[in-house]
């Protein structure tokens, strides 16, 4: 498993929350009192017409298709393993990386929904350990491959979503959706500081392929700075792509890269995660009844 204890920074990002907060719907009841006199004078009329249905924009229609496929994404993620290349860097005042350490891992995202809430666990087996400079403090980032939790029903009440038009990239037109965290709501990302977890208020944009509802890119930033906790800025950009498998032929939409920039008043870190060499596996269980021998 990954051993980055020497690189642990007070203020590193923890894994995503694994607990599902209670959802308490608010019911409103309207009561209308009518006097007998007014009722007697009322002339019979046809039933009122149903309220007009507000048309759904193409962007929000694509978003609904994407939201419906989120569970499938996490289900497929448990069927694959890949190679994760991690570059932990320190950014200088010129905006370029002055120092970095590279590591390689066998990576798998494991999910469990048996308890009624989606739980995510990242598994890493070290293939190449980076050279460690004890004088450097690096940032540990993990869990960003599962940022699609923002769209998961577990966090439906945590974000507001709005259409943001369309954008063409390399000849492909994507629908854009902006999201913004609801004040005080739970978040799938947290800042870990001195043994405590602080939910991060995230906002950003999602690029969605209109027909399939697949997410191509997701950018998230802090809604507000957390200067009192030593964090002045955070930006993450995750890219996804179609990975094809054979025998049987299947295609999974998987993360291929994640770039995370984190800034404090004195430091700027940039971590780059790249995911390659996806391999699908399937586990089968065979149960046999054996006769007891005397």
Image (cartoon, rainbow, N blue to C red):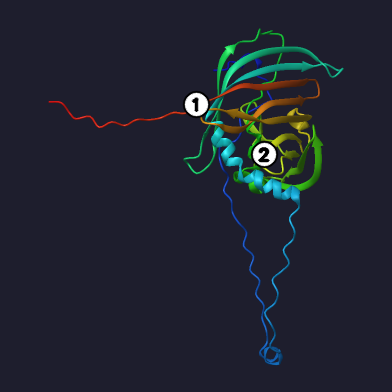
Tell me the quadrant of the picture where the N terminus can be found. top right
Task: Looking at this view, name the residue that lies furthest to the left.
Answer: 294
Where's residue 37, x and y in %? Answer: 69, 92
Image-quadrant location for residue 73 = top right
Please, is residue 56 above or below residue 250 in the view? below
Please, is residue 286 above or below residue 203 in the view? above
Total number of numbered discs in the rendering: 2
Lower position in the chain sequence, tag 2 or tag 1: 2
| Crowdedness near tag 1: few (<14), some (14–19) or many (≥20) residues, C-alpha within 10 Å | few
Residue at mark 2: 214
259 on left or right of 254: right
Q: Residue at x 75, y 34 (%)?
A: 219
Where disc 1 sits, the SS reads: loop
The residue lying toward the viewer, choosing from 231 and 144, is 144
Please, is residue 117 above or below residue 124 in the view? below
Where's residue 20, x and y in %? Answer: 56, 43
Where's residue 135, x and y in %? Answer: 71, 9
Where disc 2 sits, the SS reads: loop
Assess whether mark 1 and mark 2 are in contact (beta carbons under 8 angstroms). no
Which numbered tag is attached to residue 262?
A: none
Task: Looking at this view, name the residue that lies furthest to the right.
Answer: 94
Image-quadrant location for residue 8 = top right
Where's residue 164, x and y in %? Answer: 80, 45
Q: CA distance from mark 2 to mark 1?
A: 22 Å
Q: Residue at x 63, y 21 (%)?
A: 276
Residue at mark 1: 281
| Crowdedness near tag 2: few (<14), some (14–19) or many (≥20) residues, C-alpha within 10 Å | many
Please, is residue 199 above or below residue 257 in the view? below
Tell me the quadrant of the picture where the C terminus can be found. top left
């Amino acid at each position: 498993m990954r051993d980055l204890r020497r690189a642990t920074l007070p203020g590193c990002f923890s894994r995503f929350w694994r607990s599902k907060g209670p959802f308490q719907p608010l019911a409103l009841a309207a009561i209308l009192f009518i006097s007998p006199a007014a009722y007697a004078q009322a002339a019979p009329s046809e039933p009122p017409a149903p309220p007009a249905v507000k048309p759904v924009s193409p962007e929000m229609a694509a978003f609904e298709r994407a939201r419906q496929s989120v569970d499938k994404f996490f289900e497929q993620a448990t069927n694959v393993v890949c190679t994760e290349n991690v570059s932990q860097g320190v950014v200088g005042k010129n905006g370029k990386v002055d120092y970095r350490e590279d590591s390689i891992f066998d990576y798998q995202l494991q999910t469990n929904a048996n308890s009624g809430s989606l739980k995510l666990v990242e598994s890493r087996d070290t293939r190449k350990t980076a050279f460690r400079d004890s004088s450097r403090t690096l940032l540990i980032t993990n869990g960003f491959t599962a940022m699609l939790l923002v769209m998961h029903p577990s966090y439906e009440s945590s974000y507001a979503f709005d259409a943001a038009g369309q954008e063409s990239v390399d000849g492909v037109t994507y629908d854009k959706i902006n999201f913004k965290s609801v004040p005080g709501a739970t978040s799938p990302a947290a800042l870990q500081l001195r043994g405590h977890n602080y939910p991060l208020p995230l906002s950003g944009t999602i690029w969605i392929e209109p027909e399939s509802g697949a997410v191509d890119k997701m950018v998230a930033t802090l809604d507000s700075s957390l200067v009192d906790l030593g964090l002045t800025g955070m930006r993450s950009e995750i890219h996804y792509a179609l990975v094809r498998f054979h025998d049987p032929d299947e295609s999974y939409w998987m993360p291929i890269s994640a770039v995370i920039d984190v800034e404090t008043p004195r430091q700027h870190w940039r971590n780059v995660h790249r995911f390659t060499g996806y391999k699908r596996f399937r586990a089968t269980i065979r149960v046999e009844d054996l006769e007891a021998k005397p």
